[in-house]
Amino acid sequence: MSSSTTTATNGHAAAPTTTTTSTAVTTLIFDVDDTLYDVGTGFTAHRNGEIIHQYMVDHLKFASLQDAKQVRDEYFETYHATAKALTVAQAEGKVPAGAPTFDTAHLAEYWATHLNYDLLGPPKLELYEQLKQCPCTLVAFSNGPRIYVKAVLKHLGLWDLFGDAGLYAVDDVLPYCKPEKEAFEKIFQHIGHPPPEFCIMVEDSMKNIRRAKELGMKTVLITGKRELGRILPGDKPEANDPAVDCSMETIEEFATLLPGLFSHPPVFAPKKPIYKGYAGQ
């Protein structure tokens, strides 16, 4: 495949400058939610707000949306995965007595049929064409259930980059989930134990970025549109954190700021964007 370098599509990147010595790379591991689409779409707030709270009322017998929100927020803050959050909440007696046993597959089906995927916007055709030119192994690793994550990737037009063999969802790593190291270790086992230093984790979560760095991986932080806020304020992106090797606002900057990943062999030599009116990057 030929190398590919393109101009960022979000209009923020300008005059990039090299900041890191190049390092060989074999594997790119992408988070999905708020990474392969921008947090500013509102899709995550939709999924983690009204939809999950209604699910808890309808299927886990919570008395009100507010009661559901209180329990979900408490456990999601700790586990950063709805499937594990509700599993542990029920085990600890925080789900109403008489509720059916929480099932990840049932939640995935509910999300697949109740979410408004149109919030994600049109398919990311340019990003697809760019990533298709990358000679690295591409992996998607999400704390969401498989059926749901597959639906997101299909709507984004990115499914063919990964396929079933390249998607690792929370179903594949439970009882663990990101940022637990056991979840990452399961992924490494499945993809053939590549040396962590040859892998890049692309994420929006600081918890997951820090864990990836502890394990020896290179890291790319997706900060999102700064002014729009986060679902988890305590996990907000910190571009200057020592665990971050490269940062960008949106995934659309990926090829511009990491052109070395599209060379043969691919190398990690990130460039730093300069944003007008934003000096914190």
Image (spheres, rainbow, N blue to C red):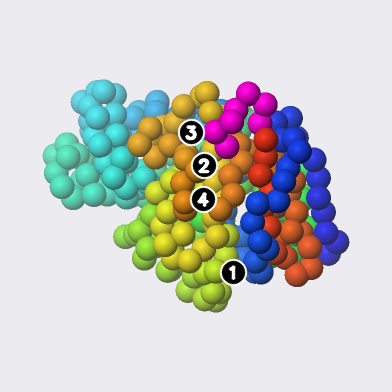
In this view, 212 is above or below 121: below
Closer to the N terminus: mark 3 or mark 4? 3
User: Which image quadrant is residue 178 in?
Assistant: bottom left
Pointer 4 or 1: first along the chain: 1
Q: How packed is label 2: few (under 14 Cα within 10 Å), some, or many (20 or more)?
A: many
- Residue 52: x, y in percent? 37, 33
The mark lying in front, picked from 3 and 4, is 4
* Label 2, label 3: how far apart the Cα atoms are: 21 Å
The residue that appears at 68% across and 63% down in the rendered structure is 22
Q: Is residue 269 above or below residue 255?
A: below
Image quarter of the N terminus: bottom right
Disc 2, disc 3: CB below 8 Å? Answer: no
Dot 4 lies on which element? Answer: loop
- Mark 1 and mark 3 lie on one chain; the one further toward the N terminus is 3
The residue tagged with tag 3: helix, strand or loop?
helix
Q: Secondary structure at mark 2?
A: loop
Residue nearest the observer in this picture, 138 or 260: 260
The answer to whether residue 280 is magenta is yes
**Category of crowding for the residue at label 4, using alpha-carbon neighbours closer than 10 angstroms: few (below 14), some (14–19), many (at least 20):** some
Q: Quadrant of the C terminus?
A: top right
